[in-house]
Amino acid sequence: MLRAALLLAAGAAALYLGACAARYAAMLRFRSRIGRELRAYLRAEGGRARAEPAAGPAAGALRPRRGIVICAGGRALLSQAWLTLDALRGLHGSRLPVELVHRGDAELPPACRERFEREFAPLRCLDALRAEPPPGSGALPRDAGHALKPFALLASSFDEILLLDADCVPLREPSPLFDAPAYGASGNLFWSDALLLSVAVEHPHPLRRFALRDGNARSSAQSVNPRIFDLLGLPRPATLARVGHETEAGQLLVDRARVLPALRATWFLNARARWLYRYLHGDKDSYRLGFAAAGLPFEQIERAPAHAGVVRGGRFLGRAFVQPWPGGGSGFLHQVARKPHVDRAWQPLTHLTRAEAALHPRRRSERGCTLPAAASALPDLGALPPELEKLERFLARSHRSLVARAAELGLPAPPRRRLVERRLLPW
């Protein structure tokens, strides 16, 4: 009996180690090939662009040229998208057309799709599973996650796109963004994250060159592994030599006609998200890589976001970023740590600070906060400004309405909990 148990344990261990070895070999292939494959893809894209005839002037005459794209599917993200769209239409009076990108009827059932299109017109739902990726770039991953956003930029019918996360709510009508000088000069505009792109010491682990993920000991204030630039054969950006901020992709603005090679390079990388995201936190800094690979200027607002949250027990707990407007003032409320949900109670925001997140490392129990710190250490901590307080009141009412109407909206059922975590392997 004992011998059989030992043999069974040894067999399970062998299978586990074999699976680990296979995944490790796949990651080594990614490291060794990704730079060459990206350069070959860009050369092929350049040849296709020269061979394809230019579109006629009436190509976009029957469709809107500018619009908003939101990726949302499933009960949680659709709850967030409902509040964002309600604020766009009901509070700001925006008439910009919207495309809601999802993956199949399981994420957005037909009845729910019809409700969104009727309540928030002009809006159309776009099934990413029916859209073709660019030739040679790679297929949409089965569990797309963050990679769905760069794919949506290519699948959209708009030429100029404001891409919003489902939980990112504009604080004003967003149409003037398309006329911002910074965007007009380069055809793209990104915002800074609170996290730092570089710290005083990069990856101090003594075995960092041999570590499987090249930075297991990275600072909590850094989520970009600088080695990704080396693997892609790209010069490390100047911000790595100083303190600079990562890219925050809760909102971004692109003119696809002007930066299409960069967007396709970005999608090429995100199509390999399983390994790329070992070096990045989701899609957000992959845009910087795509623009660098395509040789196009990358425009990012230098100001870091403010933090909106609550004060409890003498500590400020950040729940959302408040991103700036290009011309001054506040532009977006990105609820990165407060995710509105039809099945959860509303979490109010009461205070605002513009302190830097990197100065306040997180406790283990506060890792979900954008900025946890002693309230006494934040001299500018104060109540919400009037425009943010107005938005908060609207979102709270919208959330109550969403909860009351949940049954009639046809939202997808909550996902089932898994008994075994899908990502069981250590890398």
Image (cartoon, grey):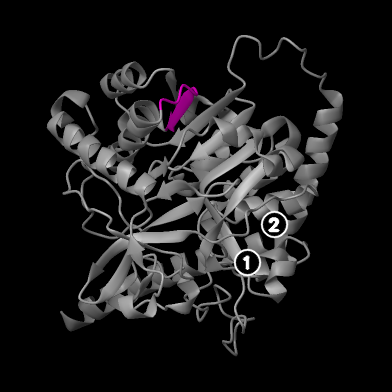
Is 37 situated left or right of 409 in this image?
Answer: right
Task: Kindly tell me whether residue 133 is visible in this rendering.
Answer: no
Residue under the image location 28 percent in, 43 percent down: 76
Q: Quadrant of residue 262?
A: top right
x, y percentage for residue 112? 28, 24
Q: Earlier in the sequence, mark 2 or mark 1?
A: 1
Residue 39 drawn above or below residue 230: above
Which residue does the image show at 63% across and 74% down from the upper left?
243
Query: x and y percent of residue 66 in the render?
Result: 59, 25
Residue of label 2: 34
> In the image, what residue type sits under mark 2?
Ile
Q: Identify the residue at the far bottom of this view.
A: 206
Can residue 117 be spotted in the picture? yes
Q: Which residues are magenta?
A: 93-102
How busy is the neighbourhood of tag 1: few (under 14 within 10 Å), some, or many (20 plus)? few
Q: Position of residue 1 (x, y in %)?
A: 15, 79
Number of labels in the image equals: 2
Q: Which residue is mark 1?
A: 28
Q: Residues within 10 Å of mark 2 (few under 14, many from 20)?
A: many
Q: Is residue 96 magenta?
A: yes
On screen, 321 above or below 344?
below
> Where residue 141 appears, x then y in whole percent?
50, 43
Q: Quadrant of residue 127?
A: top left
